[in-house]
Amino acid sequence: MAKNSDNDKSITIYDIAKEAGVSPSTVSRVLTNSANVRPEKRDRIKALIEKYNFRPNALAKGLSDTRSRVIGVLMADIRNPFYAALYVACENAALARGYRVILCCSLGETEREIEQLDILKQQSVEAIIQIGGRVDAVITEPAYIAKAKQIAEKLPIITSGKIDEVPCYRVVIDANEAVRLLTEHLIELGHERIALVGGRLDVISTYEKYMTFCKILKNHGIPINKRYVYEGRYDYDAGYEGVKELMAMREKPTAIIAINDFCAAGVIRRLIEEGYRVPEDVSVVSYDNTYITNLTFPKITSIDYDYDTLGKMLADTAIDVANGESVPTFRRVMPSLVVRESSARRNGGKT
Amino acid sequence: MAKNSDNDKSITIYDIAKEAGVSPSTVSRVLTNSANVRPEKRDRIKALIEKYNFRPNALAKGLSDTRSRVIGVLMADIRNPFYAALYVACENAALARGYRVILCCSLGETEREIEQLDILKQQSVEAIIQIGGRVDAVITEPAYIAKAKQIAEKLPIITSGKIDEVPCYRVVIDANEAVRLLTEHLIELGHERIALVGGRLDVISTYEKYMTFCKILKNHGIPINKRYVYEGRYDYDAGYEGVKELMAMREKPTAIIAINDFCAAGVIRRLIEEGYRVPEDVSVVSYDNTYITNLTFPKITSIDYDYDTLGKMLADTAIDVANGESVPTFRRVMPSLVVRESSARRNGGKT
DNA sequence: GCAATATTTGAAATCGGTTGCAAATCCATA
DNA sequence: TATGGATTTGCAACCGATTTCAAATATTGC
């Protein structure tokens, strides 16, 4: 049961070397495939490696060649399916290129995230992927900026968001397109009284969504009603509370864009509790297309980000930069709309 | 933007030493607090550490003192909220004791999981927490056993499940108690025709649940109907399909125990589609108490495992064992029942 | 003020790999 | 068979910490 005492020592390159009757350098060479080794010896060494199931110590390797082959992924909370999906996508992409990934979750605490930037550096990661800007944590505190700046001087930072004043590589979802897809989807279904639920306008990404939303309405000649914007957190409760407020209005919205799937679930729940039918009376759509969209009834129409592609782009950018290749500092990926059951043509139903 | 070229080199203990006019050993001593250092020097060194925000290279540290202060966590899929919750709990507990955590997800592929056992060892983790036995992946293939056995000789393995033939420390949820809580909850509500949906009986943990379930029914003098068991995967579809089959029967069940929350969501969906009301016509309960229980309508009555406690126990066990402390090889944690909206007293309703 | 003891300190070895350089071995050609 | 160039190999230094051991310095008691 390995009480961490007895035969703890692992096999090293020296053991292999001795048994093969060669020098450690030679073993290293076959390990890394970095130079020719006489076939006869090579086979002998390989056999031993096989026999003992030898794996070079990753710590030592990282130390000596100063290439740790590890990248760090920093995000708010892996329990959020949006992040989890992206994490797995990044990891798969990294793995495919021989890199490992270290995960750090700030859980929304700025201080912890600052700490984690240091930890990642300490772990000799070759690059940091910061997946952020999507949750309540508004990480723009000066202390965070300062630390990120400091780190960014040593290590490339790749972000799916945006870190003020900090030079980093950005791989972002085209938010304008996302807003457009949702808004025009609803407009095509005949909706004009469209409400926005959840998210805070002092979060840049949310604010941008709002602005685009207004622009699109204007383009379609639909009047903008500021009362149709319910600011809140990025969770279920925000949706639930938002509906309470919106449906108490005289001119009730006929469609709601929730800031994410969690929020949409809250929206739907409250609507149903109040006796509205979704989507017959009110259409509900949201961003993220996590599996939550399939768990509610009705299933939610949502914006999909193609997590695999996005994750791969993040990881590839990180690894390319780490390898000194020149990489565009800005990339965007296009979202798409997945229509499910929660959105439908507007009817004359109850107002 | 750190193109991984220019001033890549980080500050080392030597730099600090030189500037402080002392030897590296001395710096190391203040770093690890392992011996006295004259206050004057100590302050000087600490100031420099502060000034440069110096953090000792974790690779070098791990290499030299052969204590990596890292434990590995191996699970099927972090995108599953059950695992995610447990992971975060483990990580927090580990962090609190100065340990870091490396996450590996097998994504249900046995081969990948085998590979990851090697990777973790290669990373010099001090212990491996294997959170498993809960999903479709029935990891009992001989190759896996063999590898786990091999690893277990070098490294302590702590599991929330059970790995055949492999000696490991176990921290498990009392499944009997979980089954009992659910079953008696339903019986108290007047249900006798209780169905089991999802899960495969050739998965040991599922089989054990089934056996306990039967025993409890018998204790209450309720006849066992084998047709009320719908085997399937551990997901939404299993629940959805299960209901289709069960509700086609003559004597329909009045309550359903789903193998987990995903499955329960499918169960509820299908019931509603078929015109049943939950819980008025059919009660639905499940295991895991993930946040999914709050997203459905009605919210799901589910078994909670107290993830924080479980995670802490796993992490503490891992760290204690790694530190050579003697630790019980078996621990159990008691689950509890969280009653929500999906279960109610049986009524005479439609059969 | 000096010996004896206690505390600080630094030199050097170590952890387990990689790699530059020079020596050793190989092969082909003259 | 000797000669030259190309391959293969091993030695030794290095990556950045920790730690043992002995030397240097400080403190104490007399």
Image (cartoon, coloured by chain):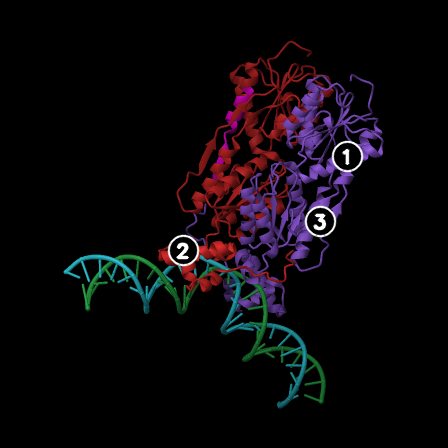
Chain colours: A purple, B red, C green, D cyan
Amino acid type of the residue that numbered disc 3 sits on in the rendered structure: Met
* Residue plotted at (69% across, 11% down): B350
Q: Mark 3 points at which residue?
A: A313
* Label 2: few (<14), some (14–19) or many (≥20) C-alpha neighbours in 10 Å: some
The reply to whether dot 2 and dot 3 touch (C-beta < 8 Å) is: no
Residue A79 image offset from top left, x and y in percent: 60, 36
**B311 falls in the magenta region:** no
Q: What stretch is highlighted in magenta?
A: B167-183
The disc placed on residue A305 is none
Amino acid type of the residue that numbered disc 2 sits on in the rendered structure: Asp
The disc placed on residue A213 is 1
Label 2, label 3: how far apart the Cα atoms are: 46 Å
Measured along the vertical axis of the image, is residue B169 above or below residue A331? above
Label 1, label 2: how far apart the Cα atoms are: 57 Å
Residue A43 image offset from top left, x and y in percent: 60, 65
* Residue plotted at (63% across, 29% down): B292
**B182 falls in the magenta region:** yes
